[in-house]
Amino acid sequence: MSRSSEDSRVHWRNTLRRTALLLAIWSIAGPVCGILLVDRLNGLQIGGVPLGFWVSLQGSIYVFVVLIFLYALLSDRAERTGH
Amino acid sequence: MSVQAWTLVTITLSFALYIGIAIWSRVRTTEGFYVAGRGVSAVANGMATAADWMSAASFISMAGLIAFLGADGSVYIMGWTGGYVLLALLLAPFLRRFGWYTVPDFVAARYYSNTARIVAVIAAIFISFTYVAGQMRGVGVVFSRFVGVSVEAGVLIGMVLVALYAVLGGMKGITYTQVAQYCVLIFAYLVPAIAIAFALTGVPVPQLAMGGVLPRLDGLSQELGLAPFSEPFTSFSRINVLAITVALMVGTAGLPHVIVRFYTVRTVSAARWSAGWALLFIALLYTTAPAVAVFARYFMLSTLANQPVDAVASIDWVANWMRTGLITLRDANGDGIMQAAELFGTGGLTASIDRDIVVLALPEIASLAPVVIALVAAGGLAAALSTASGLLLVISSSIAHDVYGQMLRPDSSDAERLRVGRIVIGLAVFVAAYFGIRPPGFVAEVVAFAFGLAASSFFPILVLGIFWSRTTSQGATAGMIAGLLFTGIFIILNRSQQIFGTDEPLIGSFFGIGAQGIGSVGMLLNFLVTITVSFFTPAPPAHVQSLLDRIRETRE
C-alpha cells in the first residue's frame, strides 16, 4: 500500500480542486441566487412561482443533492484511475 | 374508528417495530456499541442519517415556521440542506478515513492534547442536551394532543422506549431503528401532503401543486392586508437571512451526532455515497415542506380570516387545538372579528395560532381521514425519537469513551467500557426526560441555538484541522473557547427576558444580526482566533503531519 509522496500530493491536489469547484457551484446555487439575488430573480417565473422564491425553497436543494452525488462519483472515478 | 383509537394503533405498531429491531440488534462489543461494527451499507446509513438529522423541528415545526415567516423561511430550507453539502465534502470522507469512535477522538489526535479533547467533549454534551430538549418537547406535544395523556406521561413513554433500544443495541440498535423511523416519518409526511395537493389543484405532486396555489395565496394575502407570501425579507432583514442561513449551514456540518454516523460505514467511498443518499432522503421532506406551508396558510386564511370570533372557535379543529392551549383566539382590536394579522401575528401582534401545530393540524384542517391524522402523530414521534437517540449516543460516547475510557481509565477493558456506556446512556435518557417535561422554549428556536453553538465551536477547527496542517493545539482550543463563549453569552444576554426575567433584552443585536444568526459571527471569530494563535505558537509535531497524510489519502 505504500505510495510515493509525489503520488499522494497529486491525489490531495486533485481532491482540493474537486472540492473547490463543487463548493463554488454550491455558493452560487445557494447564498448568491437564493439570498443576494433573490429579488432580482423574482422578476422571472417558473411554473407559476417567482424564480427567486423557487430557488431559495426548492431549486437549491436539488442542486445540493446532485453536488454530493457528483462528488462521490468523481472521487470514485479519480481514485480508480490512480488519483 | 376515532382519531384517538387510530393514533393508539399506529403508535403501538410503530413502537413494537422499534422494540423488535432493538432485540434483534443487540451488541456485545464497544465497536458495535459506538459505530455499529462499521458494517452499515451506504443506503441504510443514508436513511439512518436522514432520520437522525431530521428532528422534531424538521417534521413538526419547519412547515409551520415557513407558513408564518413566508419566503424568509428559506433560512431553514437552504441552511440545513446547504450545510449538509459542507459536511459531505469537507468532513465526512476524512473523518471516516481517520476512523475511531467520536468527534473528540479526532480533536484529541489532531490537536495532540487532552485539553482540546475536554473542550470538545463539553461542547458535544452541551450541544446535544440543548438539541435533545427540543425533541422531548415534540414528543410531549404529540402525546398530549393525540393520545390524550399528559405531556409528562408521554415523555416518559418515549424515554423508556429510547432507553430500551439504545442501552441494548447502542449505535447498531439506533441505526436500524432510525432506518425504520425514516420510513415511518417520510410516509407520514408525504401522504397528507399529496392528498392536499391533489384536492387543491388536481396534481398529486406537492412540489408542482405549490405553483398552482401560490398565486392564489399571494392574491388573498394582499386582499387581507398582508405582504405577498413570496416576497422576501418581510420577516428578517437581508443581513439576518444571510447570517441565519450561514449559521444553520455550518452548524449542521458541526453536529457531532450526524458526523459519527459516517463512522458506521465500511469504506471512505461508502461514506461519500451515503452522504448523497442521506440528502436525497432529506430532500423528499424538505422540498415538500414549503408546499405544505403554502397549502396550510392558504387554508387558514381562506377559512378563518375576517370571520367572527365565535364562528372560528366553533370549527372542530380550532376547538381541538384550543383545548391544548396552542390556539388562543386573540381579538386584539376587540371588534369581534379575527383579522388575518390577529391570526398570524403580523404588525407587532401576538399570533393566535402556535406555529408548531401547522403540520399536525393540517390533515384535520383539510378534513382528511382519521387514519391519516394518526399517521402524522406516529411520524412526528419517529422524527423526535430518532434524533433523540442519536444525540443520547453522542452524550454516552463522550462520557464513557472519551472521559472514562481515554482519560480516567485508559487501561479499562472493552467489557468495562461497554458497561459504562450503557449506564451513561440510561442516565442521559432521564436528564433528557426532565428537559422534555420542563422545556426551555419552543422547538425550532431551541434547536436553532444548538446549531449556533455547533457552528461556533466544531466546524472551524475540524475544517482547519484537515485542510491546514499548520493549525496548532493552542490555536484550536482558543478558537473553540472564543467561539463558544461569544455565541453562548450573546444568546443568554439576548434572551435575558426569558432567562433572568429582565424587562428588556440586555443586548438587542450585533450589527443587525439577531440570536439565531449569531453563530455565523461566532464561527468567523473562531476561525480568526484559531488562525492567529496558530501563527504565534510552535508548529504541530511531526506525527500530526503523518496523521494528516493518512486521512488525506482517501484511496483504499
Image (cartoon, rainbow, N blue to C red):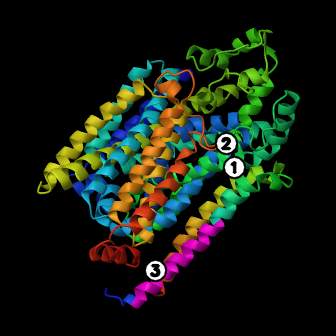
Q: Is residue B190 magenta?
A: no
Residue interval drawn in magenta: A6-25
- Residue at numbered disc 2: B73
**Residue visible at 41% across and 85% down?**
A8
- Residue at numbered disc 1: A57
Hey, what amino acid is under mark 3? Trp
Quadrant into which the N terminus of chain A falls = bottom left
Q: Nearer the viewer, residue B71 or A45?
A: B71
Chain holding disc 1? A
Chain holding disc 3? A
Label 1 close to label 2 by CB (< 8 Å): yes
**Residue visible at 31% across and 49% down?**
B121
- Residue at numbered disc 3: A12
**Mark closer to the observer (1, 2):** 2
Circle 1 crowding by C-alpha within 10 Å: few under 14, some 14–19, many from 20: many
Hey, what amino acid is under mark 2? Gly
The secondary structure type at the circle numbered 1 is helix
